[in-house]
Image (tube, rainbow, N blue to C red):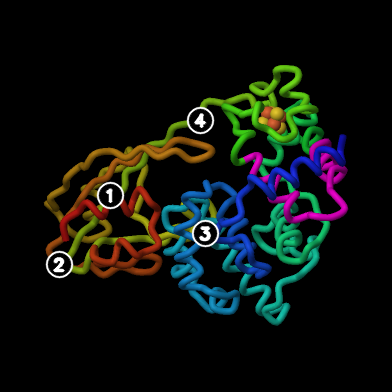
Amino acid sequence: MTSSFTRRLIHWQKTQGRHDLPWQNTKEAYRIWLSEIMLQQTQVQTVKGYYERFLKRFPNLQILAEATEDEVLALWSGLGYYSRARHLHQAARWVVAKHQGKFPESRLMLETLPGIGRSTAAAICVFAFDAKEAILDGNVKRVLARHGGVRGYPGHPNPQKALWALAEKRLPKKDLIAYTQGLMDLGASLCSRSRPQCDNCPVSQDCVAFKEGLTQELPERKTPKALPQKTKICLIVLSPAGVLLEKRPSQGIWGGLWSLPEYEDTVDIELICRQQFGITNVPVKALKSIEHGFTHYKLTLLPIKVRLRKVALVNDPARWLKLSAVAEAPLPAPIKKLLLTLNP
Ligand code: SF4
C-alpha cells in the first residue's frame, strides 16, 4: 500500500498540485524557512502578501539579522503569533553569528534554532537540500490520520507517535519534493477539514476514513473547553506628540509589539491620569469595545480616549507615536485598526 500511496500522490502532485507559489521553485533555504514559518498558523492567501513584503525589506539572512526587532515586528503586524517573528529574527542572528550566515543543512541542527520544530526543519531539508525527511504539519496529520485510520487526538503523545511512524514509513526513495509537496497540497485542497472531496482524491481507494465513513471523525478533535473571558481597559492617550504606546513584554500575547497601556477593568481611570500624567479634569471618552480571540482566552478591550493639551514626559518602555506613523508601526492588528480610525 505504501509504495502505491506515494506513487499516486507524486503523480497527482505533478499533474494537479501547486507549482507556482512564491516560495516554490527555489533552493534558497532562507526563503523556504520564511515561508514555512509564516504558513505555520496562517492561510496561503494571507501569507503571500506578507512574504513578498518581508523579502523586499529583508532579502537575505544577513539583512534580517542586522534589523531591529521593531522593524521585523512591523512587517509581521497583522499576521499574528508574533513569537514566530521574534524567533525568526533570533535564529537569523544566531546563524550569522555562529555559522557565518550559512544555513545548517541537517534537520537535527535546524531543530536547535528558535521557532523551528521537527516538521519545519524536515520541510526545509527536503525543499532546500533534497534530504529524505518526513514532515507532519497540521494538514499532513489530517491526511495521514484519515488515510491510515489513526485514532486519537493527534496532539497527544501516542497518536502523534503513530503518525510520525506512518510519515516515515511512507517516504519514497525518490521524488521527495513532489511527495512532500503532494501531502501539503492534498491537505490544503481535497482533504480539507470539513468537506473532503474523496471522490476526486488520488489515494481514496485505500483510505480507511473514506472506506469506513469516518472522514468527519478523523482526525479526532480535542475535547473543547470553554475559553475564559478577560476584560481590560486600554487607554488611548493623545497629545500633540501623538498617541502613547508601551512596549509589551516579549513573553505573552502580542509579545514585543507596541500597544496601548492596559489596565484591569476595575481601575479608576481618572485616578490613573492624575497619578501618571499629573493632570485633573481630563476629558475622558469611552469608545466602542473590541472583541479579540486568542488560543487560550477571549479578550474584551474597553478603549478610553484621553486628550492632553501638552506633551507629558514618558519613560521607557513607553513612547509617543504620531498617528500618521501608525500604519507602518509594529502594533497588534486590532489596536492598529482602532488607532487608524482616530483623527490626528
Ligand atoms: S479519500 Fe478523502 S479522507 Fe481520504 S485522504 Fe482522500 S480526501 Fe482525505
Q: Nearer the viewer, mark 1 or mark 4?
A: 1
Amino acid type, label 3? Ser
- Mark 4, residue position: 227
In the picture, which quadrant includes the C terminus?
A: bottom left
For marks 1 and 4, give the CA distance: 24 Å
Specify the quadrant that holds the N terminus.
Answer: top right
Disc 3 to disc 4, C-alpha distance: 23 Å
Dot 1 amino acid type: Leu
Lower position in the chain sequence, tag 2 or tag 1: 2
At x 50% / y 75%, what residue is drawn? 67
Viewer-proximal residue among 275 and 251: 251
Q: Quadrant of residue 322?
A: bottom left
Sequence order check, earlier mark of 3 and 4: 4
Kindly identify the amino acid type of the residue bearing the numbered disc 2: Lys
Q: Nearer the viewer, mark 3 or mark 2?
A: 3
Which secondary structure dominates the residues rendered in magenta? helix
Q: Which residue is denoted by mark 2 in the rendering?
A: 310
Q: Nearer the viewer, mark 3 or mark 1?
A: 1
- Where is residue 266 shown, x and y percent of the image? 32, 38
Query: Crowdedness of circle 4 by 10 Å Cα count: few (<14), some, many (20+)?
Result: few
